[in-house]
Image: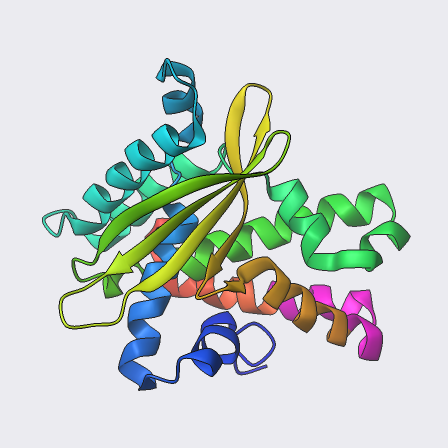
Amino acid sequence: MNGGVFAVERRGILRKRARGAAAGRIIAALAAVAMLGMAQARSVARADTGGSAMAVAKATVDRALSILANKSIPVVQRRKELREAIENNFDFTEMSRSALGYHWRSLTPAQRQDFTHLFTAFIEDAYLSKIQDYSGQKVEFLGQSQLAPGYVQISTNIVEPGKTPIAVNYLMLQKDGAWKIYDVTVDAISIIANYRNQFNRVINDQGFDKLMADLRSKQQELASLLGGAN
């Protein structure tokens, strides 16, 4: 594999903005912010009297950035805090369904459950492995737009002095009284759509079992690198 099937940052984001290897590391860290930024969404949403996704986003991104920026805490501990926070605040079933596209309909309930569990672990480990690359970038909130009843987009820029801002949008849905992320776009590249394109190629060429084997191998490799963070 060598990361080719699953290299979202290099094959997607960097294709649009070819800034070199250093930029790749920065964007990977920013993708971590994007994916982990809503860490406390459930608790904040219920405490927020306005109940808006924007209010949730602002409070929770601040919380995630504070964890990422706290260099006095070992990386392993910061990963652990972020992992514990996010596990109940993303709609991983919706993310998994979207990542498989039309192939989802042909899977048995057991296969769907297995894929969701594995894809969840992979997503968490892929972005938790990048948090050490965060170097103080800030998040500027631009606005909230409604996509459909119960669905909104929160638009932000990741800003760093002397650099072109990077547009990051959080796609959120309201479920069981809380706002949850179901996708993130970075420079107009959907993280889930990028995975879907790659996963479709593997399934179409080699079958679902091959995708599961490749994904399991990559996730185990990431988990090994994370060590005590799991």
User: On screen, 173 above or below 194?
Assistant: above
- Percent across and percent down for residue 47 are 36, 15
Answer with left or right where residue 22 lies relative to residue 94: left
Residue 200 shown left or right of residue 166 in the figure: right
**SS majority, magenta:** helix
Residue 199 included in the magenta stretch of the image:
no
Residue 158, compared with residue 47, is above or below; it is below
Magenta segment boundaries in residue numbering: 203-216
Q: Residue at x 76, y 57 (%)?
A: 101
Up-down relation of residue 226 to residue 146 (above or below): below
Q: As displayed, is residue 201 above or below residue 73?
A: below
Residue drawn at point x = 43 percent, y = 20 percent: 51
* Quarter of image, res 37: top left
Color style of the picture: rainbow
On the question of residue 230 being in view, the answer is no
In the image: residue 30, left or right of residue 147: left
